Image: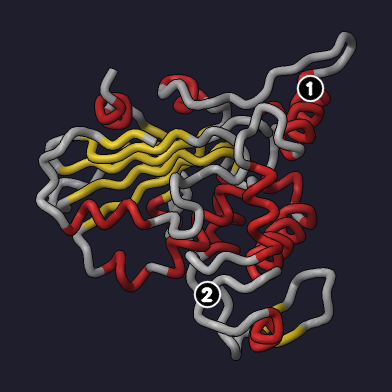
């Protein structure tokens, strides 16, 4: 089934008001629709994806682009997520049991099992294995990129920005200039952002992750025009794999600037 048909038929609880509404409500006048199906709202990928959207918010606002996201969790998780990331609660819907993910055939994650383990214990075991790169291609390389830096990626933290809410002492973003300069992703810069996300989730674990059974479930990105034609999709292959180009995760949106009439791009 065309993903657009699935989304068009899907209703979920909206975070802004708690009402169950259609995902595509109020998308009639836009030129393109971006639908993000996220893992757990407390997942590295969900938080980092939302960070990039906030970073590019001014640019995205200039485009007639409707953005809708669906994340695994409940209403409390959604509210906490939006308060932390700045993602608009009117554009976020919550999915308690990953039903939409299954409809779209998104990668459920590693399913290794040992006798006697509960569903939650199995999920934790598989999550740890995936963090080690087992059943999660690209994860270790992406973790390493967070520490070594990336000259193909933009600078992530401004020189005057204060780095707080991590186990590290508070420091200014200008510190990263000592690690190699500016104008690109410096060593430890991305790792520091991820550390802040991890601290936020661990402090509020039961809010972000009300049900641990879906810890390994991955997500996907879908871009449509207003006729429902799928212009781009990315199906996450593993942890920290939410984009085809992790150096520039939103680079696929350049498709909007073109008169797209080419076949769907799958990555």
Question: Residue 79's quadrant in the figure?
Answer: bottom right
Q: Quadrant of the N terminus?
A: top left
Which coloring applies here? secondary structure
Task: From the viewer's perspective, tell me whether residue 243 is left or right of residue 147.
Answer: left
Task: From the viewer's perspective, tell me whether residue 114 is left or right of residue 231.
Answer: right
Question: Residue 233's quadrant in the figure?
Answer: top left
Vertical arrangement, residue 134 with respect to residue 240, above or below: above
Select label 2 or label 1 by which is in front: 2
Mark 2: which secondary structure?
loop
Residue at numbered disc 1: 122
Q: Residue 184 carries which label?
A: 2
Distance from the alpha carbon under mark 2 to that under mark 1: 39 Å
- Local packing at callout 2 (Cα closer than 10 Å; few below 14, some 14-19, many 20+) is some
Of the pair 240 and 31, the residue shown nearer to us: 240
Q: Which mark is residue 230?
A: none
Residue 16 spot, x, y in % from top left: 44, 53
Of the pair 265 and 168, the residue shown nearer to us: 265
Q: Residue at x 60, y 63 (%)?
A: 84
Residue 88 spot, x, y in % from top left: 43, 60
Which mark sits nearer the N-terminus, 2 or 1?
A: 1
Q: Residue at x 34, y 29 (%)?
A: 10
Q: Residue at x 25, y 46 (%)?
A: 33
Vertical arrangement, residue 164 with respect to residue 119, above or below: below
**In this orientation, does residue 14 appear?**
no
Q: Which residue is drawn at 10% across and 51% down?
A: 259
């Amino acid at each position: 089934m065309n993903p657009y048909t699935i989304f068009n038929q899907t209703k979920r609880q909206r975070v802004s008001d708690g009402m169950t509404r259609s995902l595509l409500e109020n998308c009639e006048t836009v030129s393109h629709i971006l639908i993000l199906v996220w893992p757990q709202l407390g997942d590295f990928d969900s938080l980092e994806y939302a960070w990039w959207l906030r970073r590019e918010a001014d640019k995205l606002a200039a485009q007639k682009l409707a953005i809708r996201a669906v994340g695994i969790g409940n209403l409390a998780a959604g509210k906490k997520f939006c308060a932390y990331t700045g993602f608009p609660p009117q554009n976020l819907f919550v999915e308690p049991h990953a039903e939409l993910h299954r409809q779209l055939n998104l990668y459920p994650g590693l399913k290794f099992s040992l006798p006697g383990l509960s569903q939650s214990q199995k999920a934790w075991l598989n999550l740890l294995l995936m963090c080690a790169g087992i059943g999660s291609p690209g994860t270790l390389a992406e973790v390493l990129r967070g520490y070594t830096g990336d000259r193909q990626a933009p600078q992530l933290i401004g020189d005057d920005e204060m780095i707080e809410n991590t186990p590290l002492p508070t420091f200014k973003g200008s510190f990263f200039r000592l690690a190699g300069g500016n104008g690109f992703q410096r060593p430890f810069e991305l790792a520091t952002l991820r550390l802040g996300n991890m601290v936020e989730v661990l402090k509020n674990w039961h809010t972000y992750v009300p049900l641990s059974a879906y810890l390994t479930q991955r997500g996907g990105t879908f871009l449509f025009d207003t006729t429902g034609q799928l212009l781009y999709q990315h199906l996450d292959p593993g942890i920290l794999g939410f984009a085809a180009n992790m150096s520039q995760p939103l680079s696929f949106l350049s498709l909007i600037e073109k008169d797209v009439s080419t076949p769907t791009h799958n990555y």
